[in-house]
Amino acid sequence: MTALLTTANWNSAAWMRELRAAAPDRKFVLHGIDDYDPAEIRYALTWKPPEGLLPALPNLEVIFNLGAGVDAVLSDPELPDLPLVRLVDENLADRMAEWVTLQVLAHHRGTLTYLAQQHAHQWRERDQPIASEVRVGFLGYGVLAQHAARVIVSLGFEVQAWSRSEKDTDVTLYVGDEALPDFLANTDILVVLLPLTEATREIVNADLIAGLAKDGALGGPILINAGRGGLQNEADILAALNSNVLKGASLDVFQTEPLPADSPLWTAPNLIITPHNSAVSDPRSVSRYVARQMQAHEAGQPLENVVDRKRGY
Ligand code: NDP
Ligand code: OXD
């Protein structure tokens, strides 16, 4: 059964190599490079597929999204009504935990201030609260946030989270829209790991920022977003950084990517920018995940991590 790969601007050669290594008996074709008959395609392995491509595959059975977030694939109004499998992968979760930990510690330990002092040849110590005095709140508490939270807890931070539904967890959990104000009022460092859906679009705005704790040990709130750019109102974030309402921020995702060269965010105070690479999909690890699922599907077993289209994630 043939599988079609389409990966926007990723390194397609590496992906084809790893897919063929993970499933040597299977035929893989690369959209835009290989010739193929649309009728032979049973699986689509996609990241930001060109609009109209998936609806044109008459015998498609399963769509594998090669990342965790499915907002791009769901934005195709003609997306076929087939199982859409998202990526849940230890490798991805480890990478995200690294990035979140790096950003939390960077702000907690005043890294940007010390870098500025270094450039000015200044030797000056700043107050340093201990981690247990700082409250880290995860906005969205799914696979990636829970994994990152384990590391943040192990460093001694007080950790809490906000999600849509109840779950069994050791951290303090706030559930649903009514609980959001309390969650924010008890958060010094906000880590956004939500999916982009109709319910979460631009949730990170001036109102949300105003609700964050102002009495924390860091002297003001910090925002960290690795979810999606569509979750944030960038004008509001910029204004909050410029007015020192936000003490600092780290953004890995943006409304427009790549971030335009003339965006005022590039020079916003106390902002760390990374180019949507907090957790990249690893071709080897993901190929094994996809190969295992295709085999299970053909053996009549249920697919894992199928997206709930109604919820949007
Ligand atoms: P999950 O689906 O496992 O977790 C999503 C979390 O968000 C869940 O806790 C869910 O609640 C919560 N949530 C969703 N909608 C709402 C809502 N309306 N109100 C409250 N909580 C809500 O996703 P992952 O952890 O795997 O990934 C999260 C996102 O991270 C992805 O969607 C993607 O956009 C982004 N990402 C970014 C990467 C990058 O490189 N920057 C890399 C990988 C992912 P509940 O638990 O109740 O369902
Ligand atoms: C993802 C991403 O969703 O890389 O996996 O953004």
Image (cartoon, rainbow, N blue to C red):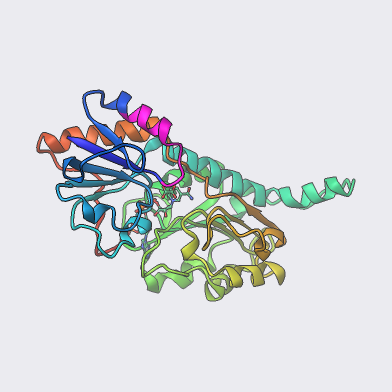
- What's the residue at 26%, 27% (across, down)? 23
On whether residue 15 falls in the magenta region, the answer is: yes
- 299 vs 48, left or right, is left
Q: Residue furthest left?
A: 300
Residue 142: image location, x then y, percent: 37, 52
Q: Which residues are magenta?
A: 8-19
- What's the residue at 50%, 61% (across, down)? 229
Q: In this orientation, which residue lies closer to the viewer: 254 or 148?
A: 254
Q: In this orientation, which residue lies closer to the viewer: 24 or 225?
A: 24
Q: Determine the image quadrant of residue 301.
A: top left
Ligand 1, by image quadrant, is bottom left
Q: Quadrant of the N terminus?
A: top left
On whether residue 134 falls in the magenta region, the answer is: no
On screen, 30 above or below 217? above
- 39 vs 234, left or right, is left
Residue 7: image location, x then y, percent: 39, 44
On screen, 132 above or below 174? above
Residue 190: image location, x then y, percent: 54, 59
Q: In this orientation, which residue lies closer to the viewer: 215 or 62?
A: 62
> Would you say residue 279 is visible in this rendering?
yes
Q: Determine the image quadrant of residue 13.
A: top left
**Count of number-bearing discs:** 0
Q: Quadrant of the C terminus?
A: bottom left
- What's the residue at 25%, 59% (across, down)? 79
Residue 293: image location, x then y, percent: 22, 37
Q: Residue furthest bottom?
A: 207
Helix, strand or loop for the magenta stretch, by majority: helix
> Would you say residue 313 is visible in this rendering?
no
Q: In this orientation, which residue lies closer to the viewer: 258 or 120?
A: 258
